[in-house]
Image (spheres, rainbow, N blue to C red):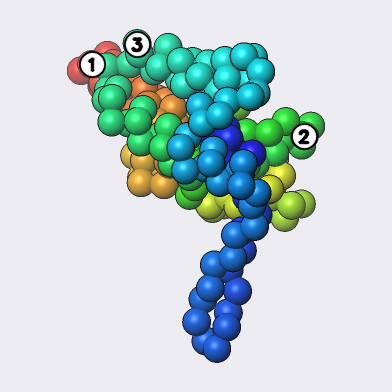
Amino acid sequence: PKPNRYQCLDSQIFVGGETVRVEILSREMEIVNRKGILANWQGSYNELSRYYQHYLELLDHLGAEQDLRMEDVLRYAQMESVQAFTPKGERLDLPQGSTVIDFALAIHPGLGIQGLAGRVGGRKVSRLIELKDGDMVEVLSSPEVVPSSDWLDFVRTTKARLALRKALRAQSLARAEEVGKEL
């Protein structure tokens, strides 16, 4: 199941040149999928607590940021997600369309800011490539990498967007101090 407990096996097949979506799920799964996480809740309190803790942590982490907008948090909470894995097998749930930068920033801000590229499924890829469900991602970093405002066009997570804005502001401030000292 996804973090919001939505679950089913789904696929798209081509029939006579048309795309047909096929979903396989039980009645219980359909009830949860249609009515939400609390529909006929029989899971443990701990499972429900972990689900909500995920969003509370996001709010806590992002709450101190000046650029935080509630619609960013709500958009993040409602997005379809992909599951990507670290080389150690840890799972990260990210919004659909997330890139290697999103993945790196979800692990640690320093790793994402210095993200040079990634290795997905053993193959070297750009830091801007979109991840697919089930990808195993290794982030390749370098202290010489400097983030660019262009990266903001490629990230999907609020956490990544805020970390990039913070790094870009710090770069601007450092450059302004350099120019000030020169003058």
Q: Which residue is mark 3?
A: 64
For the residue pair 153 and 83, the one nearer the viewer reads as 83
- Relative placement, left or right, of 72 versus 43 is left
Total numbered labels? 3
Quadrant (top left/top right/bottom left/bottom right) for the C terminus: top left
Quadrant (top left/top right/bottom left/bottom right) for the N terminus: top right
As helix, strand or loop, the secondary structure at mark 2 comes to loop
Q: Give yes or no for contact between labels 3 and 1 (Cβ–Cβ under 8 Å).
A: no
Residue at left offset 50%, top offset 19%: 52
Label 3 to label 2, Cα distance in Å? 31 Å
Q: Indicate whether 129 appears above or below 17.
A: above
Tell me where residue 138 appears, x and y as whole percent. 70, 40
Label 2 to label 1, Cα distance in Å? 47 Å
As helix, strand or loop, the secondary structure at mark 3 comes to loop
Q: Which residue is mark 2?
A: 89
The residue at the far right in this view is: 88
Tell me where residue 129 appears, x and y as whole percent. 54, 53
